[in-house]
Amino acid sequence: MSDKGIDRRSFLKGAAASAAAIGTHLAANSALAQTEKPSAESKDSGRPSERVIGRPGSDFMVDVIKATGIEYIASNPGSSFRSLQESIVNYGGNKKPEFLTCMHEESSVAMAHGYAKAAGKPMGMIAHGTVGLQHAAMAVYNAWCDRVPVVMFAGNFLDADKRRPGVEWYHSVQDPAALLRDFTKWDDQPVSLQHFAESVMRAYKIATTVPMGPVLITADGDLAEEAVHDEKKLRIPKLTRSIPPQGDSGAVAEAAKLLVAAEQPVIIADRACRSQEGMKRLVGLAEALNAPVVDIGGRMNFPTTHYLCRSEDRRQLIGQADVVLLLEVADPWGQFNTISDPHHEYRRFAKPDVKTIHVCLGDTLTKSNYQDMQRFMSVDLPIAGDAQATLPALAEAVKSAGGIARRVSLTDRTTKLRDDYRQMKERARTAASQGWNASPCSTARMSATLYNTIKSEKWCVAVSGVQWNRNLWPATEYFNFLGGSGGSGVGYSAPAAVGAALANRDKGIVTVSIEGDGDLMYAPGVLWTAAHHKIPLLMVVHNNRAYHQEVMHLQKMAALHNRRMDTAAIGTTIEKPNIDFAKLAQSLGVHGEGPITDPAAIAPALTRALAAVKRGEPAVVDVVSQGR
Amino acid sequence: MKIEIVLSRFFSILVFGASALLAQEKPPAGSAERGYEAYMKYQCYTCHGTVGHGADRGTGPKLAPNPSPYAAFALQVRTPRLDMPAYRKPFLSDQELADIYAYLSSIKPSPPAKDIPLLDF
């Protein structure tokens, strides 16, 4: 986001006074320069280069940002917020917040996305209000869909009278947030510093109120660069956080009755838990009901080691269920129905009379344009409430809803449930053993080897392009799995993993990711950011040398159109030349291993990579892998 | 007994009987080497793995070792159930199909999970 070749913005302001010093080029070619008179301020201050602003507005903006507790600001530098950047570094001491140098605004937002899920609090980011936010847009959409808070700032020069000609006009906008308004929770464009202070606090509060989401505050360039006037009148409001709402007690009691009376209850959790405490609460409810839990994985909701964790048996369980409790499920309809592709045949795999309960705040945060609300489903008992906040009351209601006889009968399910769990795990292990010695390496072997390398550490899978981790790995901690991107916008994984690794760095948690090759190539510069800021991340590249998900779409279209079936590789493969991710990583200052085609070579490479990570460095292990 | 259950049982018996008949049919002659080439050319491996081992998240079921009887295999390839695209004769010949089947039949089993220490979760 450089604007090299453009003079400083003070140039025009003092053009007449300093024409001799800066040459005659502008005076000869610019009508503005010939007619504009020096401002009173310029006269008073003499030569423009001698003018000094001891307390710019951006210093106060830094005070405000510090008051939120934001520790990092991810950004690709841009002239529209140069004053704020300078204040962060020189006035703020580049600590809390620290400026993180990013190589793409999409990376900045995705880093903040991954960070928020690991840290449990937002990161900031700054971008140009025009070209920066345009780059950032896809990552903002992911954060919106994933209900993750990101506090964004946009630089902009609203006052047209002060803009330099050329690039600064291209980089100015009447309404910076318009581009993102369909998928942000709130935005504002403050016109005074007091306005800025109040709006930042409001934005932070809104972003972190469930359902969470990204927010945007415009930091006007002139407001930032000009001096603070009458500072005694400025106040930074105290930051307060909203308490998540619990579902209505009557509805909770009704839900408990339905669940206790059910013969085949099932719990489906998606973005239900925010902490270890949330998981504990869900375990408490599931055990009180002795009901299997399907963890869709938007968050880490349930320990995979628990006999009630039956995520891989979702279809079978839903098919048998008479009551299903959904907890913050993004796509409820899709849990009971599906539509074949490409023939659009409707299939329902749930019983027609299954009773449904949904504890969710989804309806409180929805907009019309982007369709992340998913297909409408009539829920029998919709409870507008936060799942984690509602779980204790629901568990208590369940315990008191059934008599002793019923509680005994619920306990009688245990033997079968434990047996079903064992069978599910055995099926996963058997499936993982298939193609064990294949080259390219099987994704199961890649996953299992990674676990074996880090199993003695506190570990976090920030992102993963394969499901084996959830199916096989014993995960009991909230920080173990961070879930997916939200909107499935490609390019999320690498920066999100770096952001999560930053949050985990000081907690002694080893962060790993299984990264798609196509995803990484969207903005691989984030590896340099990881190296530069010494962010330890063990990234395994699931290098299947293709956009594999797209292959079958083309095969389906060819079949539908009754055409040749051997051309799906065109436009979907990433070969000729093959990308060498180890060399790519090394060129960006990151420890690189691979490309690995022999599955037996994965383990030693991972061991070396983990040693680098333990030294505080990022590391990339390029594993040439099966498609899926 | 509900009519759906009756129909479901009748269908199960029908499928079982058909499978038994299909299993008796001898597969046509094919070349495992040519079959591998065709398997890769038509990108069967993207969903089913290069050694027919199946894929993560159930995107492609396991095909080998011990593929299903040839007639059932051919039926699925030509007129597939679920989301698999149809590979019709003009674009995948009978001989290519037989070759692919020969390749799948030639694939040796992987070690059992119990013998793989890394799968001792």
Image: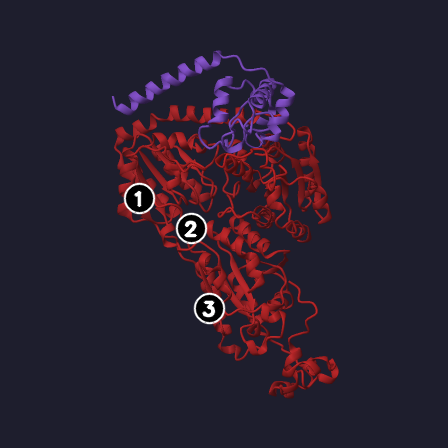
Q: Visible in this render: residue A89? A: yes
Of residue A591 and residue B13, the one placed in the foreground of this image is: B13
Image mark for residue A371: 2
- N-terminal-most mark, 3 or 2: 3
State which chain disc 1 sits on. Answer: A
Q: Position of residue A504 (x, y in %)?
A: 58, 47
Q: Mark 1 = which residue? A: A378
Q: Residue at x 40, y 40 (%)?
A: A334
Please tell me the colour of chain B.
Answer: purple
How has the structure been colored for display? Answer: by chain
Q: Quadrant of the N terminus of chain A?
A: bottom right
Image mark for residue A198: 3
Of residue A454 and residue B101, the one placed in the foreground of this image is: B101
Work out whether disc 1 and disc 3 sit on a shared chain. Answer: yes
Few, some or many residues within 10 Å of mark 3 (<14, 14–19, 20+): some
Work out whether disc 2 and disc 1 sit on a shared chain. Answer: yes
Q: Left or right? Give the position of B121 relative to A580.
A: left
User: Is the Cβ of the residue at disc 3 closer than 8 Å to that at disc 2?
Assistant: no
Report the chain shown in red: A
Few, some or many residues within 10 Å of mark 1 (<14, 14–19, 20+): few
Q: Left or right? Give the position of A271 relative to A532.
A: left
C-alpha gap between disc 2 and disc 1 = 17 Å
Few, some or many residues within 10 Å of mark 2 (<14, 14–19, 20+): few
- Tell me how many marks there are: 3
- N-terminal-most mark, 1 or 3: 3
Which residue occupies the extreme front position in the image? Answer: B90
Q: Position of residue A7 (x, y in %)?
A: 68, 73
Q: Residue at x 58, y 77 (%)?
A: A162
Look at the picture and state if A501 lies above or below A164.
above
